Image (spheres, helix red, strand yellow):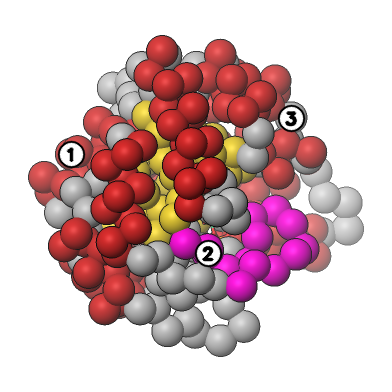
Amino acid sequence: MALVTLKELLLRAEEEKIAVGAFSVGNMEMVMGAVRAAEETGQPIILQIAEKRLKNSPLPLMAPMMVSAAKNAEVDIAVHLDHGLTLGCIDEALAYGFTSVMLDASLLPFEENISMTQKVVEKARAFGASVEAELGVVGGNEGDTAEHKILCTDPTSAKIFTERTGVDALAVAIGNAHGNYPVLPELRFDILEQIDKTVATPLVLHGGTGITDEMFRRAVALGVRKINIATASFDHLAKYAKAYTDTVDTPDYFTLSAEMVRGVYDNVKRHINVFSML
Ligand code: 13P
């Protein structure tokens, strides 16, 4: 098993009518927990990190670890830059051996989103890497406090966008948002169905934290092939760490580290099972 491209995993997911989990990581314990869950379930995963998270988890440290974890895993793993904001970061991730990159130009006007994405596709192709782009606006904001107002993806624009850019995956906005939802979201499955009918490219659902298992299964049945989970893993790590430190007077690092791994492992495994329609 090996480091593979996002495109390869999504093609397989399409054949099997399942989704591949894309799990955000910010340190070694998160990488270890996610890989352990993938190996135990025998399912491929995507390890990803967003550009805005690099303030906490620098790319020169994270990238070699993520790529090495993928190369040494017993399952296939793609390593992905989530929500790239600058072409410089895309270049860096590709040079480190990421097998997939996303440029999030979704807040730019349609034509500018297309031309920025075309540049990324050209860069990625030189490395044999895959590209994800976003059309429409997903709520919240990965790694920031500013909130973005949701703007659902228009199916006709999505068709034009994917044909003109040639991206390997398209993130859609159907009422989903990053972070913990204040109330259960009402996902627009009617729009997702139209996008799936109009667009040949595999679809991506961001903002997975807090979406119910039933909604995940419905999204997968309507063509979603990659589902992003970030907040739930960060929260699980923090919760398990706190549960441990609360129980002892003098916490030791090694038990704490193992609990962090276990927190992420439990969260990732649960989601892999749902996304694989097990
Ligand atoms: P959550 O933090 O809501 O799980 O969203 C993850 C995501 O979409 C990362 O791009």
Of labels 3 and 1, earlier in sequence is: 1
Which mark is on residue 58?
A: 3
Q: Which range is magenta?
A: 136-149
Three-letter amino acid code at the position of disc 3: Pro
Question: Residue 42, percent across and down?
Answer: 26, 40
Residue denoted by label 2: 138
Residue drawn at 56 percent across, 86 percent down: 183
In the depicted view, which residue is nearer to us: 110 or 93?
A: 110
Label 1 CB sits under 8 Å from any ligand 1 atom? no
Few, some or many C-alpha atoms within 10 Å of disc 3 (few <14, some 14-19, many ≥20)? Answer: few
Q: Nearer the viewer, residue 175 or 135?
A: 135
Circle 1 Cα neighbour tier, 10 Å, few/some/many (<14 / 14–19 / ≥20):
some
Q: Is residue 111 visible?
A: yes
Which secondary structure class fits the magenta region best? loop
Relative to 170, is 197 on the left or the right? left
- Which residue lies under the disc numbered 1? 12
When the figure is inspected, residue 63 is found, relative to residue 148, above or below; the finding is above
N-term mark: 1 or 2: 1
Residue type at mark 1 is Arg
Q: Which mark is residue 4?
A: none
State yes or no: discs 3 and 1 in contact (Cβ < 8 Å). no
**Mark 2 Cα-neighbour bin, 10 Å: few <14, some 14–19, many ≥20:** many
Q: Quadrant of residue 192?
A: bottom left
Amino acid bearing label 2: Val
Does label 3 or label 2 sit earlier along the sequence?
A: 3
Q: Is 256 covered by the magenta stretch?
A: no
20 horizontally vs 253: left or right: left
